[in-house]
Amino acid sequence: MTDQDHSYRPQSPDFSTFQSPISPPPPPPPPVAPLHHLPPLYQFGNPLAHRASYDASPFFSPQYQQPPAPPTRVPQHYLPLDPDMARRSSRIAQAAEVAPLPPAKYVDPVVEEEPPEEEVVEEEEPPKPAPPAPVEVKTKFPVARIKRIMQADEDVGKVAQVTPIAVSKALELFMISLVTKAAKEAKDRNSKRVTASHLKQAVVKDEVLDFLADIIAKVPDQPAGRKHDDDGSDQNDQPKRKRGGRRPKDDSD
Amino acid sequence: MSDREFSSNDDLSLPKATVQKIITEILPPSSGQTFSKDARDLLMECCVEFITLISSEANDISEKEAKKTIACEHVERALRDLGFGDYIPDVLAVAEEHKEQLKSREKKQSKMEQSGLSEEELLRQQQELFRSATEKYHAAPE
């Protein structure tokens, strides 16, 4: 965990270039300094910078005689993302199935290959640190709760202080494995929505998960009411545009 | 569902919000997949069952060793016996991290040991400080 944290979160970024608090206060800037500061200030206030981001949009036909946006940015934007992502996620899924190794194994390539988002056009936006890897989980379970669940079994007596922490980590890995497997089941059935029956399928396939047999027994094998994409009942789902098939008439102004 | 919030049964499940957060971290919106609520509830049940399984197995192991407290080694053995050996390196790393944290915390607390001086020496220094303070106090008004 710590290693991975270090890999994308610099511990003390850029402080080396700053003066330490003990050192004497910086000398007053030479008279030339304000002139050096001017260009960046001008760029921030410059309306052209905003216009450039509009020009990059395909929905906007530029009316100004504006030179095209820097060539370094444009080709990056509309790379065909879908095939790459499909290949990548199927590779992840394969890796998860063939060898359920610790997720750290395949975190790195995902981070590196993270494609730029389609709609990112904000030039002024400061560069973000590396986006969080999909499989690395930062949220932690409450250790006290884990301990209480452990001790709900009356046979279980005292528990060392570290033990719930260790169990919590194991639980995290267990959850990653379950969710990933269920997501793969859903994908194999062309469903964007991972349902309980997908989770059940994943559990049934893995004999290590036999201890969950009682729990999954109550879940129907096949999605009962065709709970696929076309089921828009879940409020987490964003409404599908395809269903209507027609555009709203009056919104075209 | 919310009316069961205060029952003891709810206490023994995992917090929904945390579980949902973790699911979203595993399946971010960019993955194009959403995790339905029934799947999440089932997942939570599975997780509780997993905890129960591990702790019960670890408990058995510790009892065989005539230990009264379930230690990290017992969890480790339980994971291996139950087919979750893959988790062990990460689990041990986290446990080790926690031990290190405890150690450094203890060190901070025991300032006396850090000073590297014997108790007698420290006591002597303290008395000296008291004496000099008393002298200063008496000297000041005049």
Image (spheres, coloured by chain):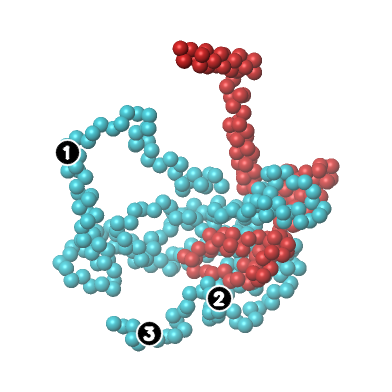
Chain colours: A cyan, B red
The mark that comes first in sequence, 2 or 3, is 2
- Residue lying at 37% horizontally and 66% vertically, measured from the top left: A118
> Which residue in the protein does label 3 denote?
A247
Q: Is residue B125 above or below residue A44?
A: above
Residues at discs 2 and 3 in contact (Cβ within 8 Å): no
> Which residue in the protein does label 1 denote?
A32
- Residue A234 image label: 2
Q: Is residue B131 above or below residue B100?
A: above
Tag nearer the camera, 3 or 1: 1
Tag 3 secondary structure: loop
Which x, y percent locates residue A160? 72, 43
The mark that comes first in sequence, 2 or 1, is 1
Please state the total of marks drawn on the protein image. 3
- Residue A197 image label: none
Which x, y percent locates residue B67? 81, 42
Which residue is farthest front?
Answer: B142
Q: Nearer the viewer, residue A206 or B24?
A: B24
Query: Which amino acid type is marked by label 1?
Result: Val
Which x, y percent locates residue A92? 54, 60
Q: What crowding class fits label 3: few (fewer than 14 Cα within 10 Å), some (14-19), or many (20 or more)?
A: few
